[in-house]
Amino acid sequence: SQQGEEDPQALSIQEGENATMNCSYKTSINNLQWYRQNSGRGLVHLILIRSNEREKHSGRLRVTLDTSKKSSSLLITASRAADTASYFCATDDSETSGSRLTFGEGTQLTVNP
Amino acid sequence: ETGVTQTPRHLVMGMTNKKSLKCEQHLGHNAMYWYKQSAKKPLELMFVYNFKEQTENNSVPSRFSPECPNSSHLFLHLHTLQPEDSALYLCASSDLSRADFSGNTIYFGEGSWLTVV
């Protein structure tokens, strides 16, 4: 069954604006990861946040995790046209830690120049 | 360049053909995966290999047959596929020995686009 669900499914913004994507999940997790996929290419790991962390930063990326609400958000600040891609959250759940990640359907982000 | 190489990048095959997808990872990882990505559906995990041993088969039809001869190579043999099997097939690898410490970060190849006609 699907674990992570991203919201919104699609997001269109202007260059320089911030983009926020949300992910909700159902079961307990060890960590949550965000990946990016350019059209027709493989996924690239962006950032991992552990279940005991609440916020993490990496460059223009900021990830939050609320385990009580079983949700996470990915914020991209000062977006660029090159940020146009699909963004997926993936959960590493407690029962099968280390063997599988479960991905959501993704958010398609379009950054207009 | 992610360190995971997939070939071919594009494949068109008939329903009666037999073909194979190949994946090679140069990262020294011990786990390899096959994922299927179809339009408007979440990424589907198909198979997991841990130290060459298959540890997961997510109810994948037998027309898909994986092979993992060593920790660096993974194949997906295709036989009598259906048009609905057309998708992007993604190979990935990870280092499960570090998973408990740093999380199971997965490194993906660029994928093989499969079209079944």
Image (spheres, coloured by chain):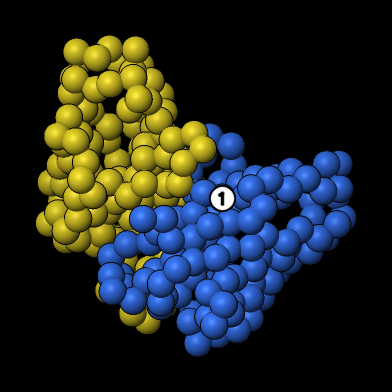
Chain colours: A blue, B yellow
The residue under label 1 is: A106
Give the chain letter at badge 1.
Answer: A
Quadrant including the N terminus of chain A: bottom left
Residue drawn at point x = 79 percent, y = 55 percent = A79
Image location of residue B47, percent across then percent down: 24, 49
Residue drawn at point x = 64 percent, y = 68 percent = A73
B25 left or right, relative to A30: left
Residue drawn at point x = 55 percent, y = 65 percent = A24
Residue drawn at point x = 28 percent, y = 70 percent = A96
Image location of residue A53, percent across then percent down: 55, 85
Q: Is residue B20 visible?
A: yes
User: What kind of element bears circle 1?
Assistant: loop
Image location of residue B53, percent across then percent down: 12, 56
Say which of B105 and B29 sits in front.
B105
Q: Is residue B106 visible?
A: no
Mark 1: few/some/many CA within 10 Å (<14, 14-19, 20+): many
Quadrant including the C terminus of chain A: top right
Say which of B17 and A26 sits in front.
A26
Q: Is residue B112 above or below residue A99?
A: above
Q: What amino acid type should be assigned to the residue bearing mark 1?
A: Gly
Occupied quadrant, residue A46: bottom right
Q: Is residue B62 above or below residue A42?
A: above
Image location of residue A42, percent across then percent down: 48, 44
